[in-house]
């Protein structure tokens, strides 16, 4: 553990050990078991849950919020303020954002490593790069002989037998599940088709196949207002959740 960093980017599991850590934030969960002792004098928030089992002890005098539950069993002891917030959405969000950032870094390093050898591993598909021009690559997927296409917007990737198919597939890709950027959208805000799809999938959790089928069965404009998305998706999976997301700030008629 690199304690020069004030954030631990994962789950902290301590079993049968005595550990002192100086982290202020832990992105994942804290799990202290057996006869382990964990002293965390600077710890303020935990993105996941806190578990203290057996005869373990956790001392966190500055702990303010926990994204999940707090579970203390057996003769275990948790020394923390009584007003610690459990199931705290803010702590959970911070943990998710940290985890997402770490995942992106790992993905970036992995893709760069493959690219240096003339290969792509985008979306977990190993392919040899035949040629590349900007965001478009011609590739041969391992195990196949025909050339296909791979396109990216810098965050998401999409494969296709043709360039059009790959570009169309990119419409339905989402980079992460963070909905914060959409909270600033007004009902009159006009967005691109891709941003509309991205917002809908991110907010509702709708799958790519379901959204694609819904869109292909209906005429969808290249740009649309948020209120138009709500009208267009009535009856679709997650439609009420999408409308309710904006109802918090605006009067949305369902």
Image: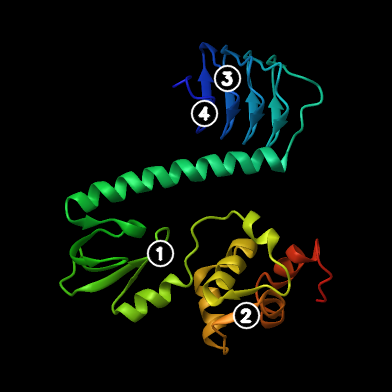
For image coordinates 23% across by 53% down, the residue present is 115
**Counting residues from the N terminus, which is met first, the one under dot 4 or under dot 1?**
4
Instruction: Describe residue 32's horizontal placement relative to residue 90 as left or right.
Output: left
Q: CA distance from mark 4 to mark 1?
A: 30 Å
Q: Which residue is mark 1?
A: 153
| First along the sequence among labels 2 and 1 | 1
- Which of the numbered marks, if any, corresponds to residue 224? 2
Q: Is 155 situated left or right of 129 in this image?
A: right
Of the image marks 3 and 2, the number of the one nearer the N terminus: 3
Label 2's element? strand
Label 2 Cα neighbours within 10 Å, binned few <14 / some 14-19 / many ≥20: some
In the rendered image, the vertical position of residue 120 relative to residue 62, given as above or below = below
Examine the rendered structure and indicate whether residue 192 appears above or below residue 128: below
**Residue 194's x, y, as percent?**
52, 73
- The tag on residue 8 is 4
Q: For mark 3, what is the residue? A: 33
Residue that appears at 27% across and 49% down: 112
Q: Residues within 10 Å of mark 4 (few under 14, many from 20)?
A: many
Mark in the foreground, 3 or 1: 1
Q: Is residue 254 left or right of residue 231?
A: right
């Amino acid at each position: 553990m690199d304690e020069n960093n004030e954030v631990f980017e994962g789950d902290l599991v301590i079993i049968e050990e005595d550990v002192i850590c100086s982290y202020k934030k832990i992105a994942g969960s804290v799990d202290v078991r057996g006869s382990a002792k964990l002293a965390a004098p600077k710890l303020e928030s935990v993105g996941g849950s806190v578990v203290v089992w057996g005869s373990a002890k956790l001392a966190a005098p500055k702990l303010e919020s926990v994204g999940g539950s707090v579970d203390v069993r057996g003769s275990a002891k948790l020394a923390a303020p009584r007003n610690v917030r459990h199931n705290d959405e803010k702590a959970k969000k911070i943990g998710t954002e940290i985890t997402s950032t770490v995942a992106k870094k790992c993905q970036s390093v992995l893709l760069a490593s493959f690219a240096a050898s003339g290969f792509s591993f985008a979306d977990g598909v190993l392919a040899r790069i035949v040629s590349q021009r900007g965001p478009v690559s011609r590739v041969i997927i391992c195990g196949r002989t025909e050339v296909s296409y791979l396109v990216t917007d810098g965050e998401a990737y999409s494969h296709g037998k043709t360039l059009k198919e790959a570009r169309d597939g990119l419409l339905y890709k989402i980079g992460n599940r963070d909905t914060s950027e959409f909270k600033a959208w007004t009902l009159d805000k006009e967005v691109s088709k891709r941003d509309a799809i991205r917002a809908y999938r991110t907010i509702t959790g709708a799958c790519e196949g379901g959204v694609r089928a819904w869109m292909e069965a209906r005429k969808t404009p290249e740009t649309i207002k948020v209120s138009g998305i709500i009208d267009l998706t009535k009856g679709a999976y997650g439609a009420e959740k999408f409308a309710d997301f904006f109802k918090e700030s605006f009067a949305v008629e369902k």
